[in-house]
Amino acid sequence: TYAFCLEHGPEGDIYVGGISQGEMTMEGYLARLQPDGGLSSVQFLTNVTEVRDLAALPDGRLVLASVTGQGLQLVSPKGEPDHSFQPAPELAGRIRDVVTWNNGQLLAAGSFPDGRALVPFYADGSVADT
């Protein structure tokens, strides 16, 4: 098991993202630690083989970045996928980092189909014009 990223949640929790490897499988995971450091929960994620980075939104939801699968996934603080989140085709790629940014926007860093290294986007998955 490897941890790749840490993020503070709005309630003081700490989120950990990474990969758990078995003999024949790899699964991405999201763990939540309580403010005192105790383990609150661990969620293994479907269709994500690793969580490279994550960003906490003000409402508690988390944007997960991966170099596999669809690249980005939006989940609840408990790790449940938000199926209404549909990343724009411009966001398909190998995403290495994601941060909250300018007025509710997020910024993804990685390798994207159009050759860009950075793509600004909104929490609904649409690409920002910035």
Image (spheres, rainbow, N blue to C red):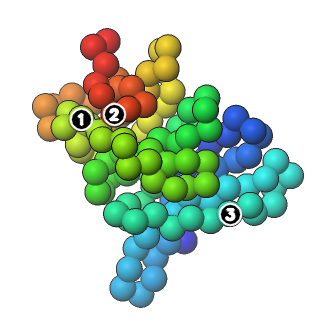
Q: Which of the 4 quarters of the picture holds residue 109?
A: top left
What is the distance, in whole Å, between disc 3 and disc 2 at their CAs? 26 Å
Q: Is residue 88 left or right of residue 10?
A: left
Residue depicted at 37% across the width and 43% down the height:
84
If you read the primary sequence from the N terminus, does the residue marked by circle 3 or circle 2 appear first? 3
Quadrant in the picture for the N terminus: bottom right
Which residue is tagged 3?
41
The 10 Å Cα crowd at callout 3, few under 14, some 14 to 19, many 20 or more, is few
Quadrant in the picture for the C terminus: top left
Residue depicted at 20% across the width and 33% down the height:
90
Res 114 seen here: yes
Q: Position of residue 8 (x, y in %)?
A: 68, 39
Marks 3 and 2 in Cβ contact (< 8 Å): no
Q: Amino acid under label 2? A: Gly
Which residue is tagged 1?
88
Which residue is tagged 2?
125
The 10 Å Cα crowd at callout 1, few under 14, some 14 to 19, many 20 or more, is few
Q: Secondary structure at mark 1?
A: loop
Q: Amino acid under label 1? A: Ala
Q: Secondary structure at mark 3?
A: strand
Q: Which residue of the protein is positioned furthest toward the front in this rendering?
A: 84
The 10 Å Cα crowd at callout 2, few under 14, some 14 to 19, many 20 or more, is many
If you read the primary sequence from the N terminus, does the residue marked by circle 1 or circle 2 appear first? 1
Marks 1 and 2 in Cβ contact (< 8 Å): yes
Marks 1 and 3 in Cβ contact (< 8 Å): no
